Image: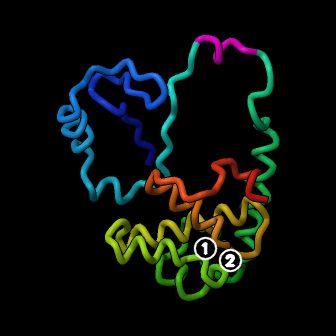
Amino acid sequence: MVLAANPCPCGRFSPKDSLCECPPSSIRRYQARLSGPLLDRVDLRVEAERVTRAELTADGARGESTATVADRVRAARERAARRLAGTPWRTNSDIPGRDLRNRWHAAPGAMEDAERCLERGVLSARGLDRVLRVAWTVADLVGRDRPDARDVALALHLRTGVPRGVPMAIGALT
């Protein structure tokens, strides 16, 4: 499932150069229209900044090529398939939470921040499983045998939107 939403009713709010004139109460009401149970089922939350005309028309590096990313995804899927050989699952998203927690463990201490988020009510039990699942995917993308604290921190950031000291680019984690 993919969701997209504006940050406010007018759609012009931006932390760097806001043209929005919506009152804070209107923004809160607008954002509250997405229910907690629905948002609990969203694994990756990414804010996209408005692109300026200069950025849109500029020449130069725009990040990795599609082919490079496709190769990394292919390798990650192969890594997961090898790890899951002999099970009914082929991808991290297929694994039930209980099996994910009990059969495949993150590096020692890697889940501490996520578990604290669960204890504080920032994450639900479902959310904790989904963070672990995304952390396994990040580990597969960067070629690690199991998620470490950086992978879990990125998964938490992607789930909650709160930066936890890790770069957003997968390539920066290697």
Residue 91 shows in the view: no
Q: Give the range drawn in magenta.
A: 53-58
Q: Is residue 156 above or below residue 2?
A: below
Q: Main secondary structure of the magenta part?
A: helix
The chosen color scheme is rainbow
Instruction: Tell me, yes or no, whether the two marked residues, 1 and 2, touch with CB atoms within 8 Å.
Output: yes
Q: Label for residue 131? A: none
Q: Is residue 118 above or below residue 15?
A: below
Q: Which residue is drawn at 30% across and 54% down?
A: 38
- Which amino acid lies under the numbered mark 2 shown in the image of this protein? Leu
Q: In which quarter of the image is residue 137?
A: bottom right
- Quadrant holding the C terminus: bottom right
Tag 1 secondary structure: loop
Residue 24, x across and y down, in percent: 23, 33
Residue 168, x across and y down, in percent: 63, 49
Q: Tell whether position 121 is magenta.
A: no
Tag 2 secondary structure: loop
Q: Which residue is drawn at 70% across and 66% down?
A: 139
Question: How far is disc 1 from disc 2 in space, using C-alphas?
Answer: 6 Å
Q: Residue at x 55, y 59 (%)?
A: 164
Q: Which residue is drawn at 47% across and 83% down?
A: 98
Q: Is residue 32 left or right of residue 15?
A: left
Residue 140, x across and y down, in percent: 72, 65
Residue 113 shows in the view: yes
Task: Identify which residue, 2 or 57, lies in the foreground.
Answer: 57
Q: Where is mark 2, residue-wise?
A: 84
Residue 3, x across and y down, in percent: 41, 41
Q: Is residue 34 left or right of residue 89?
A: left
- Which amino acid lies under the numbered mark 1 shown in the image of this protein? Trp
Q: Label for residue 89? A: 1
Give the mark nearest the N terminus, 1 or 2. Answer: 2
